[in-house]
Image: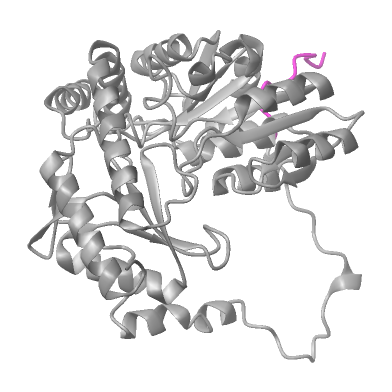
Amino acid sequence: MKSSIRPVVAPQSVPSEAPDAVLADPLAPVPDIFAKARQFTRLREVQEMGLYPYFVPIESSTSTEVVVHGKRLVMVGSNNYLGLNHDDRVIAAAQTATAKYGTACTGSRFLNGNTDLHEELEVRLAALTGKEAGLVFSTGFQTNLGVISTLVGRNDVVVIDKLDHASIVDGCRLAGGETVRYRHNDMNDLETKLRRARGHAKLIVVDGVFSMEGDIVNLPRLVELCAAYNASIAVDDAHAVGVLGATGAGTAEHFGLTDQVDLIIGTFSKSFASIGGFVTGERAVIDYLKHHARTEIFSASMPPAACAAVIACLDILAREPERRLQLWKNADRMRDGFRALGFDTGGSVTPIVPVVVGDDLATFEFWKRLFDAGVFTNPVVAPAVPERESRIRTSYSATHTNDQLDFVLEMFAQVGRSMGIIS
C-alpha cells in the first residue's frame, strides 16, 4: 500500500526543456552570454580616474576605526550601531561556541545543522519582538527571499515601498504572486494600490528604517490601511532592531504597534555584530516557513559562533540600555552638525545620516577626498538610490567619541567647501 503521508518539504522544481518552436536559427550568429560583462566599462573608467570606492581591503579594525594600507581612518560607514563587534564579551561567546561546536555545522537546519544555540536564539528573538515564535536564516537577505517567496502564492499580491531593500525586491521576484509598488512612504498612494487589490490575499513588506534614507516608515497609518483593506504586514527591521523602541525591539515597539504587525524580519549583521537573519510571528506561520522556505531548507545553517555572538549581544542590549541612548546622542549630534554646515541630509531621523551630493562622479570625488583625509564613508549611486540623488551614506555607533565625530564634521566641512557643495 502506498503511504498517504506527504513530505513536508516543498519539492525542488525541474525546469522544462524549451520547445522547438523557440529555438534560434542554427545558421545565425550565436549571442555571447558574456557580452554584457565585457561591455561593462564604467568600472574601468572610474578606476582610471582614481575614484573607485568599493571593495576597499580593511587590514584591521576597532569598533570605530579601520586600517587601510597602513593608514587609520574613522569608520562612519558601518552598521555597527551598538558598537559590539569588538566587545570582549561577544568575542568570548563566539570563541567558546567555536571550541564546543566547531567552525560550522556543515549542513542545513533541516537535517544536521540544528543546535541548541539556534533554538535558544529563536526563543530569545521571539521574546524580544513580542511574538510567539522565531526562525533564523543564514543571512538577512535569505530571510526576505524565503519569507516572501514562500508566503506569496500565485493569486496573492505583495505590496512594497519603492525604496525597500533589494532583498525584498528579489523576494518578490521569486514569489508566484503579483508585485505592486507604492511611492516612498506615501500612504495615499499605498491606499490606492490596496483598493485596486481588493479580493486578493495581500502582504505588505516594508522597511522599518530605510537603509539609504535614514527615515522611518509611517507605520501607524500603514496599520490603519491594512485593517481597512484586510492586508497583512511584514516589517523588515534590519536597521531598526537594537536601535528603535524602548527595549530595542524595533519599529513596531517604537510606535506601540507590536500586536498590529504580523511578521518582524531582521538581520544580525548590524546591531548584533554577527551574520544571519530572522523572522518572528505567529507560531503556525513560523512552522510553515520552517518546512517550506527554500532558503532555509537548502542552505547551510548559521555557524554556532554566529548564534552565540547574537545571544551575547541580546544580553548586553537588555543590560545596557545606555548604549542605545548614546547611539541616538551621536546620531543627533552628526545630523544637526551636517545641517548646520549646509549639507542636505534628506529625511533622516535615525543613525543613518546621508549627505546628498547628486552627481555620481562628484559623489565619488567627495568620497575619495574624505578617504584621503581619514574618514571612511560609503558612496551610494543609482540604482541603490534614485537617479541624480547620489549620496555619501554615513552611519553611527554608540562607541564613537566626540573627538571622532568632531573630526568627521571638520573633514566634511573642508571637503564640502573645496568642492563647492557648501559655502
Res. 110 in view: no
Residue at screen point 38% across, 14% down: 247
- Quarter of the image where the C terminus is located: bottom left
Judge by depth and name the residue closer to the eye, 50 or 146: 50
* Image quarter of residue 12: top right
Question: Relative to 180, is 47 on the left or the right?
Answer: left
Q: Is residue 365 left or right of residue 283?
A: left
For the N terminus, give its image quadrant: top right
Give the residues in magenta. Answer: 1-11
Residue 163 position, x and y percent, is: 59, 48
Residue situated in front as seen by the camera: 314 or 411: 411
| Secondary structure, magenta segment, majority class | loop
Q: Residue at x 87, y 30 (%)?
A: 200
Q: Quadrant of residue 289?
A: top right
In magenta segment, residue 103: no
Q: Seen in the image, is 26 located left or right of residue 324? A: right
State whether residue 385 appears in this view.
yes
In the rendering, at what x and y percent does residue 294 appear? 60, 35
With respect to residue 377, does 141 lie above or below? above
Q: Does residue 380 appear to the left or right of 185 in the view shown?
A: left
Image location of residue 345, percent across then percent down: 42, 51
Percent position of residue 133, x then y: 53, 11
